Image: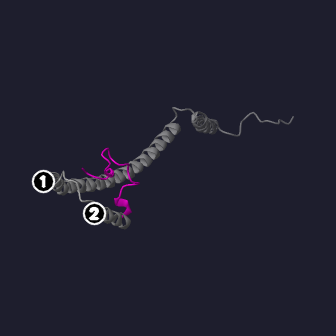
Amino acid sequence: MIQMFPGRTLIPGWVKIVAVVLAIIAAVALAAHQWDRLWSWLPWSDERRLERVIDQRDRLAAEAVAQAAHIEVLTAQARRVETVHRQVIELRDLTDPVIHEARSAPDASTPLDPDRADRLREHDRRLCELAPGACAGPAAAPAGSGDPALSDRDPG
């Protein structure tokens, strides 16, 4: 009779053991690789934490750039305000003595001659034509005694 499968195996036992061990190692490696992919969507996974850290880094970098630009603008504005403040102080220092002198002059309460008042109004009108920004808006109503009211820009 012819035997289809001989009683003695053609593959030694140690080769079978090595093949089984390699198959187990390959199966474990494949399972581990798929296991990482299986759980990577969870919020506590390393991939998600890395994404959150990168997003936070990008957001903080953008905020730092915006804050630096804001600081530059505020610094420039502070310099401009300082300059204007200094000019206002210098202007007050220059005009206060003159205003005090004009108010304490002996003829400060005497009315002006009508011809002189007309001349002064004409000069004022010409100055307003030359520098319209320095003049008040439309003429104000006369004061209580009938004299023309002072403009809003009058320091006194």
Q: Which mark is residue 122?
A: none
**Residue 103 x %, y %:** 17, 51
Left or right: where 50 falls relative to 149: right
Residue 96 lies, with reference to residue 132, above or below; the image says above
Closer mark to the observer between disc 1 and disc 2: 2
**Residue 91 x %, y %:** 22, 56
Residue 152 lies, with reference to residue 126, above or below; the image says above
User: What segment carries the magenta color?
Assistant: 131-156
* Kind of residue at disc 2: Asp
* 139 and 85: which is toward the camera: 139
67 part of magenta stretch: no
Left or right: where 108 falls relative to 139: left
Main secondary structure along the magenta-highlighted residues: loop
Q: How many marks?
A: 2
Mark 2 Cα-neighbour bin, 10 Å: few <14, some 14–19, many ≥20 = few
Mark 1 Cα-neighbour bin, 10 Å: few <14, some 14–19, many ≥20 = few
Q: Residue furthest right?
A: 1
* 104 and 56: which is toward the camera: 104
* 36 and 126: which is toward the camera: 126
| Image quarter in which the N terminus is found | top right
Task: Report helix, strand or loop for mark 1.
Answer: loop
Q: Residue at x 37, y 60 (%)?
A: 133
Left or right: where 39 falls relative to 81: right
**Residue 151 x %, y %:** 33, 52
**Residue 122 x %, y %:** 33, 65
Left or right: where 38 falls relative to 56: right
Name the residue that disc number 2 marks. 115
Q: Earlier in the sequence, mark 1 or mark 2?
A: 1
Q: Which mark is residue 106?
A: 1
Give the spatial CA distance, label 1 vs label 2. Answer: 21 Å
